[in-house]
Image (spheres, rainbow, N blue to C red):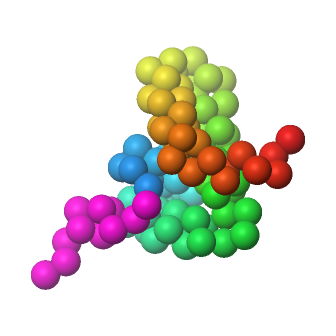
Amino acid sequence: MINENDILDMTCLTREQIAAIAHHEHIDEVSAAELGEYLMHLHHGPQKVQAMICEDISEALHADDLTRARGLYAALKEFVAEHPEALRGNG
């Protein structure tokens, strides 16, 4: 039987990246994993995921939540390293 962990592990995104999408979209992590995986296969989808994480960082900084901002920055750094296509066309 497939459980929540299996679903989260089937995506090309890390748990931190999935959590950032979930927070950004106000949805549960399974739905965020599905959305993230869908976006990663769309034209400019990786840029949308990257933008979500960046917006979450901005929100955390405005809330003076430096711990969350640092965690999100680490997730962003890993995302861009794994998915350099997320930077193409941004600028």
Seen as rendered, the residue at the extreme left is 1
- Tell me if residue 5 is in the magenta stretch: yes
Q: Which residues are magenta?
A: 1-12
- Residue at 57 percent across and 51 percent down: it is 83
Could you say where residue 71 lies in the image, as x and y percent from the top left? 45, 29
Query: Which quadrant of the rendered structure holds the N terminus?
Result: bottom left
On the rendered structure, is 36 left or right of 19? right
Nearest the viewer among 81 and 38 is 81
Where on the picture, by quarter, is residue 16? Answer: top left
Nearest the viewer among 89 and 61 is 89
- Residue at 61 percent across and 23 percent down: it is 61
- Residue at 67 percent across and 53 percent down: it is 85
Nearest the viewer among 78 and 26 is 78
Query: Which quadrant of the rendered structure holds the C terminus?
Result: top right
Q: Is residue 59 visible?
A: no
Could you say where residue 88 lies in the image, as x and y percent from the top left? 76, 50
